[in-house]
Image: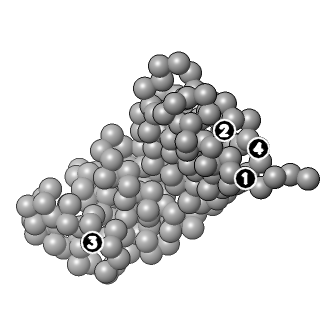
């Protein structure tokens, strides 16, 4: 069993007390039944999460909308699972959705996992979205340092020269300075 799936099923088992409904949903091999859980009225969040995660790992694009909603959830473990499944889903809409979530100032408190997903995807949307998000985090007294740090580290991982100006600006922020220096060192010199 995939380690992320094991972690998610264990968390949900604890959440549900190992109910019969949980055991059934974990055991089913029918993708149609899992997809039905995503749209049927009255389904608990844990059931939708488990169904979406399993479908996402299987590459079933019916899970996309549910996984995007979970990626932007207030509960970090749900975000982690959604990001993991979205990275494996193979849906071309994933990078656009992650970029929209990462750059949404109204939901910036939940942008950490979309930022990390963008780095993993290495999509055309990744660098512009990370630059935009980081630029906004460089304001004085911005409370979202973890998001800023994830952007800095991600831009270093991606190694795109377009990030050089914002990373240089990040050097002036003590909480980001070392990570920004490391990220700049990873960007190839032009010319």
Q: Residue at x 45, y 57 (%)?
A: 83
Compared across the picture, whether 162 is left or right of 14 comes to: right
Compared across the picture, whether 73 is left or right of 191 comes to: left
Examine the image and state in which quarter residue 17 appears.
bottom left
Q: Which mark is residue 5?
A: none
Relative to 169, residue 45 above or below: below
Q: Residue at x 33, y 65 (%)?
A: 51
Nearer-N-terminus badge (3/1): 3
Nearer-N-terminus badge (2/4): 4
Q: Which mark is residue 6?
A: 3
Compared across the picture, whether 134 is left or right of 48 comes to: right
Nearer-N-terminus badge (1/2): 2
Q: Which mark is residue 167?
A: 2
* Residue that numbered label 1 is attached to: 187
Which percent across, then down, holds residue 53?
Answer: 37, 64
How far is disc 2 from disc 3 in space, using C-alphas? Answer: 37 Å
Nearest to the observer: residue 29 or residue 92: 92
Where disc 4 sits, the SS reads helix
Nearer-N-terminus badge (4/3): 3
Examine the image and state in which quarter residue 120 appears.
bottom right
* Residue that numbered label 4 is attached to: 162
Q: Quadrant of the N terminus?
A: bottom left
Q: Residue at x 51, y 45 (%)?
A: 150
| Direction top: furthest residue | 140
Q: Are marks 4 and 1 in contact (CB under 8 Å)?
A: no
């Amino acid at each position: 069993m995939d380690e992320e799936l094991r972690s998610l099923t264990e968390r949900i088992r604890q959440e549900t007390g190992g109910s019969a409904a949980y055991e059934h949903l974990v055991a089913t091999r029918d993708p149609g039944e899992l997809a039905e859980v995503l749209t049927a009225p009255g389904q608990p969040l844990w059931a939708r999460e488990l169904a979406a995660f399993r479908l996402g790992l299987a590459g079933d694009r019916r899970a996309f909308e549910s996984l995007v909603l979970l990626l932007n959830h207030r509960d970090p473990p749900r975000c982690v699972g959604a990001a993991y499944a979205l990275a494996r889903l193979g849906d071309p809409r994933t990078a656009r959705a992650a970029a929209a979530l990462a750059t949404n100032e109204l939901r910036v408190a939940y942008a950490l996992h979309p930022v990390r997903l963008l780095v993993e995807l290495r999509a055309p949307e990744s660098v512009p979205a990370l630059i935009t998000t980081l630029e906004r985090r460089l304001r004085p007294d911005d409370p979202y340092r973890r998001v800023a740090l994830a952007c800095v580290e991600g831009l270093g991982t991606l190694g795109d020269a377009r990030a050089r100006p914002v990373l240089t600006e990040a050097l002036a922020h003590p909480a980001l300075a070392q990570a920004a220096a490391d990220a700049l060192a990873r960007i190839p010199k032009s010319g």
